Amino acid sequence: MMRANQWKKWMALALVAPALGTGLEAKPEKKEPFDRAWVPQPVFEKEPGYVELYWTAWQQAYDHVAHKEGIAQTPYMDEAFSDSHVWIWDTCFMVLFCKYSPEKFPGVETLNNFYEPLHSDKYAGGTFPLGIRHPDNPPLFAWAEHGNYLFTGDDDHAKTLLTETKYLQKHHHWFNQLEYGWQLQTQEGPSAEVTLEPKKLGYKWTGCSSGMDNTSRNRDGLWVDAIAQQGLSALAIQRMAERLGEKEIAAKWQAKYESVKQMVNDYYWDEEDGIYYDISEDGKTFHKVKTPASFWPMLAEMCSPEQAQRMVKHITDPNTFGGERPWATVARDHPSFVAPDGAYWRGGIWLPTAYMGTKALEKYGFHKEADEAAENLLAHMYRTYKAVEPHTIWECYSPTRDYPVVRRNGHIVRKDFCGWSALGPISMFIENVMGFHTVDAKEKRIEWRLHQEQKHGLKNFKFGETVADILYDGAGRVTVQSNTAFELVINGENHQIKPGKQSLKAMPKQGN
């Protein structure tokens, strides 16, 4: 499921990866040090501190490239929470920064540590050496795989997934058939009990299983994120199949997507407030707690343009999710919002939901709003990095001050959390703050919203078979050096890049 040269590099890395704890782990001698040549190298004159944070994120992420004997994929990405267990939604989000260095950061490969225990007979009888904490975590495999596929253009991997193992289709069906209270057995013991309950109009869920642990959302209702994520999965499967020329698979999953989309808009959209909400089981009542979960339908492209226009107002409103520290996990004007520090999911700012919401805005062309929110969030992370000791990247961030979240028991959240918190200093920095928002390796195209005035750009930017330096000089000129031809779209204007070095005229744009 990976290219031969990449496999050789992974095997070499596996021989030097460090052991974690006891049990079946090997104890290799030494792990090679992190090398900046493995990843894109940013230039950002406006705030060099963002570059400092970027390198910290990659180093911490590399510290969590782990090795364990007997599992489906090793080395693998550890989520920075527990050596003995892995989480589905943490790992899916980590894929979306690991894609920038796939030969050294096994993001998409790590998903095999869920696919095989859940959807094959290889580890029958609970023999898998890693625990999977919440098997009913958000069903994001297809979305993560699609994002990785766009960046790498790896047809062989995508074809294997959709036509041979069919892991993505299996997980979609499996999620619809889960039984409340079921537990996955592994060598680390049983997983947490499944709390998802499929119903006629969607799914009942709970905080820990959904990933939003202590959220104030109604436990007795149907959760908008669960049904929207299933629709998103169907859409991702359809789009991967279409690219591969698998017309029958594409048509089948397009129909599934359209059915879910219709249900979400029929029952979960509140015209009065202009947002999607959780609903009662009979579909007659909205549970009006505004959280970033309401943006999953937008990410899944279920909104009309008019609905999207209303959704975007919530991220530009400082009373809900906007402001200097955006993407609070419950609206600031809701009674369950906890000041000053958000009490985990009662207002704390988390990178996965912030990243998801940012990508949702982009789907409808709200690039200015997405980029401004992303830069505000990155600035918040950097100020916290400088102000708080240890100087590190945190599990989640306060919605009111430059500080990590402090939970109600007085405990500060986890440090060195890269883990999915690397999404801010890596992915959102590249895609939003610098504006390289769309990369399509198969089509050999980068879409760049050039909106920063000062000198900035990326060196050693790898996607598919292309390696390029793309730099804006702060004075109206872009220099590109590439090993292959590709298309660079700058603020809507197409440029055909040839192998070698060339210079282009371009000016920053501030609107969408």
Image (tube, helix red, strand yellow):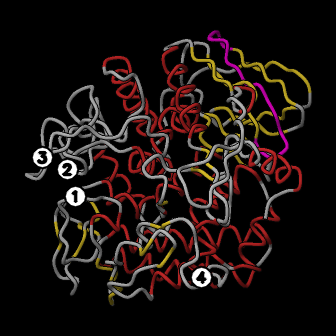
Query: What type is the residue that disc 1 sits on?
Result: Asn
Q: Of callouts 2 and 3, which one flags the residue occurring earlier in the amino acid sequence?
A: 3
Q: Is residue 35 left or right of residue 403?
A: right
Local SS, label 1 = loop
**Residue sitting at 48 percent across and 66 percent down?**
131
Q: Of callouts 4 and 2, which one flags the residue occurring earlier in the amino acid sequence?
A: 4
Q: Of callouts 4 and 1, which one flags the residue occurring earlier in the amino acid sequence?
A: 4
Name the mark on residue 333: 3
> Does 39 sit above or below residue 171?
above
Name the mark on residue 214: 1
**Residue sitting at 61 percent across and 45 percent down?**
65
Local SS, label 2 = loop
For mark 4, does the 10 Å Cα neighbourhood hold few (<14), some (14 to 19), or many (20 or more) residues?
Answer: some
Query: What type is the residue that disc 3 sits on?
Result: Asp
Q: Which residues are magenta?
A: 463-476
Name the mark on residue 346: 2
Name the mark on residue 170: 4
Q: Of callouts 1 and 2, which one flags the residue occurring earlier in the amino acid sequence?
A: 1
For mark 3, does the 10 Å Cα neighbourhood hold few (<14), some (14 to 19), or many (20 or more) residues?
Answer: few
Q: Are marks 2 and 3 in contact (CB under 8 Å)?
A: no
Query: Measured from the top left, where is residue 404 in percent x and y?
Result: 28, 33
Asked whether residue 465 is drawn in magenta, I would say: yes
Local SS, label 4 = helix
Q: Disc 4 vs disc 3: which is toward the camera?
A: 4
Q: Are marks 1 and 2 in contact (CB under 8 Å)?
A: yes
